[in-house]
Amino acid sequence: MLMGTIFLTVYIGACAFLLIRQRQMIFKPTYDTLELPSNFNLKYEEVWFLGNTRPNSQDKLHGWFIPSLKPDTEVGTILYFHGSGTNISNPIYIRDVAQLNKLGFSVFIFDYRGYGQSGGDFPSEFSIYEDAADSLKYLTKNRKIAHQKIYLFGVSLGGAVAINLALKEPSIAGLIVVSSFTSMQEEVIHLGYRIFPIAWILNQRFDSLSKVVSLKIPILIVHGTSDRSNPASMSQKLYDWSLD
């Protein structure tokens, strides 16, 4: 009886911890600048923008705009959404940007609020969706780039962000999702939290699976089979559901 009471107390305490601290467990922002685009021979413009969803805020978002190497034959502009960890100065992201730039794209990569040099409070699912919408408005209103010339590119958690934005912006040229997941609920279960009532606890849902079925734009889904964080089977499931 005593052991059962102790176990129940510990279990309830763990559930409460997961409920309260889940944002800190999902989002892992860093603030130091690791690399610059110039270190990869990329010409870039440093960008600070204030989104329309927060017109009275002084917390500007920070990003880099890398123009096409061949502006006369530019194939479009990539709006890049990074994953839950580090920030845009991660060399992995900059290498992605460099490859996309070589293909003829201009690329805009930015940090969500609370990441890198971007201002604002600690991020949440809702705030990141707002930041994504603001970044698109920056391209269309400040740079006068048509929706039909913009492709959304999301990596890992950024894939969920890109899918959410694509659902709300059906005139976007296309969507590229790399190494992402079906939903945060399935992701958490995959990471070993099956013993907890995740459906009740989780409030950062990132439910891409329920959204991808409604997308009406061209979609490219890419995933490596050696990915240990997000299994490739999740991207396969996203792809399968996107065909329905």
Image (cartoon, grey):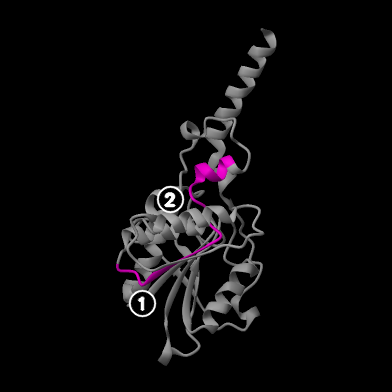
Identify the secondary structure beneath mark 1.
Answer: helix
Residue that mark 2 sits on: 209
Q: Residue at x 42, y 86 (%)?
A: 74
In the rendered structure, the answer to whether residue 104 lies left or right of residue 214 reads: right
Q: Is residue 134 above or below residue 43?
A: above
Q: Is residue 50 visible?
A: no
Residue 13 is covered by the magenta coloring? no
Q: Position of residue 244 (x, y in %)?
A: 36, 55
Q: Residue furthest bottom?
A: 72
Disc 1 crowd rating (10 Å Cα; few below 14, some 14-19, many 20+) is: some
Q: Residue at x 57, y 42 (%)?
A: 188
Label 2 or label 1, whichever lies nearer to me, is: 2
Q: Residue at x 41, y 71 (%)?
A: 151
Please give the range of residues in magenta: 171-189
Q: Is residue 192 above or below residue 91?
A: above
Kind of residue at disc 2: Leu
In the rendered structure, the answer to whether residue 2 lies left or right of residue 208 reads: right
161 or 126: which is nearer to us? 161
The answer for how far apart the CA atoms under marks 2 and 1 are is 25 Å
Residue that mark 1 sits on: 149
Q: Residue furthest right?
A: 3
Kind of residue at disc 1: Lys
203 or 130: which is nearer to us? 203
